[in-house]
Amino acid sequence: MVETTPAELDAARAVFGDRLNLAQRYVEHLATSGMERGLLGPREVPRLWSRHVLNCAVVAELIPANATVADVGSGAGLPGLCLAIARPDLSMTLIEPLERRVIWLNEVVADLGLDNVKVLRGRAEQVVDEVNVDVATARAVSALGGLAGLTVPLLHGKGQVLAIKGRSAEEEVQKAAKAIRKLGGRETAVLTVGADVLEEPTTVVRISVG
């Protein structure tokens, strides 16, 4: 079992509530088969809760009730599976091009019994006609300019992109401003979420469309 600090456990309880056991099982998947299959490195295991799962899950507070959400380049399910566990009201599509990751995601979804998740194999630009959502999420996919081109079209003219970013978020926003406007982005903001539960809050770039 992946060890948690008392602070991490408190944060996990606050974020996942009565679905904490599902989050714990997901973390076990990440630490075992996820690592074995190269979805994340062994050095990440001790910080799975703080750096990865909680960092992603707090983004749920920015998503409206009963929203449809697409997670682009879902990889190990960060943030897609974290959000699906924290928010059973969301209808989540995980978009991932690599077959081995798709197989793993489907195994985890089945094991956790997540009935609000479907996994779609493909690149975001290939599935635009199949996917029409209120919110598109991404983490560690690409710089914001390129990422906007992958995520904004999935909104089909109305909704928001929530991109989990690091300290360079403001700089990325400035560089991508022209590309975002061209795609129909109405407003771009850098937000921090999870300050009440995390030692290091999560930085999110929100692009509003329509």
Image (tube, rainbow, N blue to C red):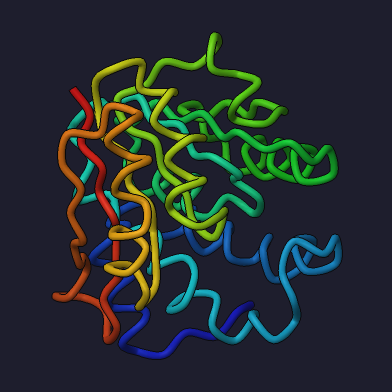
Tell me the residue at 39%/47% (across/down). 83
Tell me the residue at 39%/30% (across/down). 152
| Residue 38 x, y percent position in the rendering | 82, 64
**Of 85 and 38, which appears nearest the observer?**
38
Q: Residue 74 vs residue 39: left or right?
A: left
What is the quadrant of the N terminus in the image? bottom right
Q: Dividing the picture into quarters, in which one does residue 159 lie? A: top left
Q: Residue 15 vs residue 118: left or right?
A: left
Question: In the rendered image of this protein, does residue 62 appear above or below residue 21?
Answer: above
Residue at the front extreme, as displayed: 178
| Residue 33 x, y percent position in the rendering | 79, 61
Q: Dividing the picture into quarters, in which one does residue 107 lie? A: top right
Tell me the residue at 26%/42% (across/down). 207
**Of 115 and 46, which appears nearest the observer?**
46
| Residue 58 x, y percent position in the rendering | 29, 60
Q: Residue 146 vs residue 185: left or right?
A: right
Tell me the residue at 58%/59% (across/down). 25
